[in-house]
C-alpha cells in the first residue's frame, strides 16, 4: 500500500468519526491531514471545503470548492465538489447558480451520485421558485426505487415537468 492509500484511509476514518468531534476539533484534525498533501493538490481545498461545509460554514467552503475544481479535481471527488458547492450556494441564497451547476452535472455523466444530484437540484429548484419542476425531479429520481407504482410515479413526474395549464 502506498502513502496515498494510507492517507485516504485516514481521511475516511476521520469522516466516519465526524459526530465524535466538536466542530473546531474536527476542522483541526482535517487541517493536519490536508497539510500532508502537496500545496498544488486539489484534494486539499476539497477536503477543507467539505469539512467547513459539514460544520455549517458554507461561506468559507464555497471559495475552496471553486479552487479545487479550478485546480482540476478529478475522480469521484469532482462530482461531490459540484454537488456540495451547489448545496452551499443554495444555502447562501444563490439558488439560480446552484440550479445551473446541477443541471450541467446531470448532463455530464451517470454514476452512483445521480440521485444525489437530483435531490440537490430539487432543493435548488424549490428555492428558485420552480416548485413543480422540483417535485418532478424528485419523483423522477425516486420512481425507479419503488417496488410498486414506478410507472405511475414516472408519469406524474413527466406531467409535473410540463408547463402548468393556464385558464
Image (cartoon, rainbow, N blue to C red):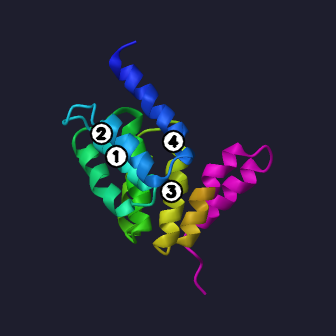
Q: Where is residue 100 in the image (x, y as percent from the top left)?
A: 37, 60
Q: Residues within 10 Å of mark 2 (few under 14, many from 20)?
A: many
Q: Mark 1 points at which residue?
A: 48
Q: Which of 151 and 137 is in front in this view?
A: 137
**CA separation, marks 2 and 4?**
21 Å
Q: Position of residue 127 (x, y in %)?
A: 49, 71
Secondary element type, mark 3:
helix
| Residue 73 in view in this figure | no
Q: Mark 2 points at which residue?
A: 44
Whichever of labels 3 and 2 marks the residue nearer the N terminus, that label is 2
Q: Mark 3 points at which residue?
A: 120
Taking 132 as reference, is 65 above or below it?
above
Q: Nearer the viewer, residue 69 or 16?
A: 16
**CA separation, marks 1 and 4?**
21 Å
Q: Quadrant of residue 85?
A: bottom left
Whichever of labels 1 and 3 marks the residue nearer the N terminus, that label is 1
Q: Which residue lies furthest to the top in this view?
A: 1
Report the mark closest to the observer, 2 or 4.
2
Whichever of labels 2 and 4 marks the residue nearer the N terminus, that label is 2
**Circles 1 and 3: CB atoms closer than 8 Å:** no
Q: Which of 2 and 139 is in front in this view?
A: 2
**Circles 1 and 4: CB atoms closer than 8 Å:** no
Q: What stretch is highlighted in magenta?
A: 139-167
Whichever of labels 1 and 4 marks the residue nearer the N terminus, that label is 1
Secondary element type, mark 1:
helix
Amino acid at each position: 500500500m502506498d502513502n496515498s492509500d494510507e492517507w485516504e484511509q485516514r481521511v475516511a476514518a476521520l469522516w466516519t468519526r465526524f459526530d465524535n468531534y466538536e466542530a473546531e476539533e474536527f476542522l483541526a484534525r482535517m487541517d493536519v491531514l490536508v497539510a500532508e498533501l502537496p500545496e498544488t493538490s486539489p484534494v486539499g481545498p476539497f477536503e477543507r471545503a467539505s469539512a467547513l461545509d459539514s460544520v455549517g460554514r458554507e461561506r468559507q467552503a464555497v471559495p475552496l470548492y471553486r479552487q479545487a475544481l479550478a485546480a482540476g479535481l478529478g475522480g469521484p471527488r469532482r462530482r461531490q465538489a459540484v454537488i456540495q458547492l451547489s448545496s452551499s450556494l443554495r444555502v447562501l441564497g444563490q439558488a439560480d447558480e446552484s440550479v445551473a451547476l446541477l443541471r450541467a452535472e446531470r448532463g455530464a455523466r451517470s454514476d452512483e451520485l445521480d440521485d444525489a444530484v437530483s435531490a440537490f437540484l430539487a432543493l435548488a429548484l424549490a428555492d428558485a421558485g420552480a416548485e413543480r419542476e422540483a417535485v418532478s425531479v424528485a419523483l423522477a429520481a425516486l420512481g425507479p426505487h419503488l417496488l410498486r407504482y414506478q410507472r405511475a410515479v414516472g408519469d406524474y413526474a413527466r406531467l409535473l415537468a410540463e408547463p402548468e395549464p393556464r385558464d
